[in-house]
Amino acid sequence: MTPPDARAEFAALVNRARLEQHLSIRTVARIAGVPPATAQGWLNGKHLPTPALRPQYLQLVERLGLTGSLPENLWEDAWATVEPALRHSGSPYLGLRPFAAADEAYYFGRTAETRRLAETIAALQSGPGHGTVFLVGPSGSGKSSLLAAGLLARECVDGVVAGPHA
């Protein structure tokens, strides 16, 4: 397990290598193919890359010649340090990943939307013929979380949407 201070030390090592190679934050961002603010967060140790950005981070680490210095289990511990804090803080924020059905206990504030979606699906299941329900919204608005932690975790029994609530 990589303690948080080891991650911070590695971020400092990455930043030192950047400075030694006379690379600006914008140049580092171009190397990794990320916005400068993201690169700066990596360099100052505020955060590790999300799973989707890990290949870009590793590309940067390789370019800086630090591949052999990567701490063991760097990625696995990133979420492990956040989850216990989340449990004790009461914060519903899980970071950038969507809520899963297993996160149902942390998911709140979308009860009306979840119920309306479940009732719409149940009406289609019990009515004549077939239908399709579309859940649309902007990227990052919580569609996946609504489906997983709301609909699947709270409204389904054995994978089937339950009927309207009393």
Image (spheres, helix red, strand yellow):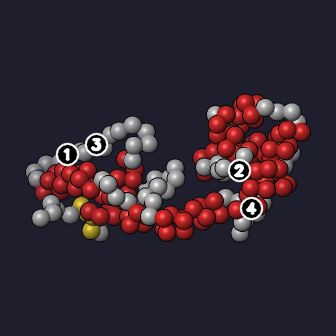
First in sequence, mark 2 or 4: give its number.
4
* First of labels 2, 3 by sequence position: 2
Residue 1 can be seen in this image? yes
Q: Earlier in the sequence, mark 4 or mark 1?
A: 4
Q: Nearer the viewer, mark 4 or mark 3?
A: 4
State the separation of the CA atoms marked 4 and 3: 45 Å
Q: Secondary structure at mark 3?
A: loop
Are the residues at dot 1 and dot 2 in contact (C-beta closer than 8 Å)? no
Give the percent coordinates (x, y) of residue 109.
32, 54
Q: In the rendered image, which residue does mark 3 sit on? A: 134
Which residue is painted at 74% across and 55% down in the image?
Answer: 8
- Give coordinates of residue 13: x percent, y percent: 83, 50
Marks 1, 3: nearer the viewer = 3
Task: Provide the secondary structure element on which disc 1 rests.
Answer: loop
- Residue at 27% of width from left, 68% of height from top? 157
Q: Which residue is mark 4?
A: 5
Tell me the distance, in whole angstroms, between the alpha carbons under discs 4 and 1. 53 Å
Between the C-alphas of marks 2 and 4, the distance is 10 Å
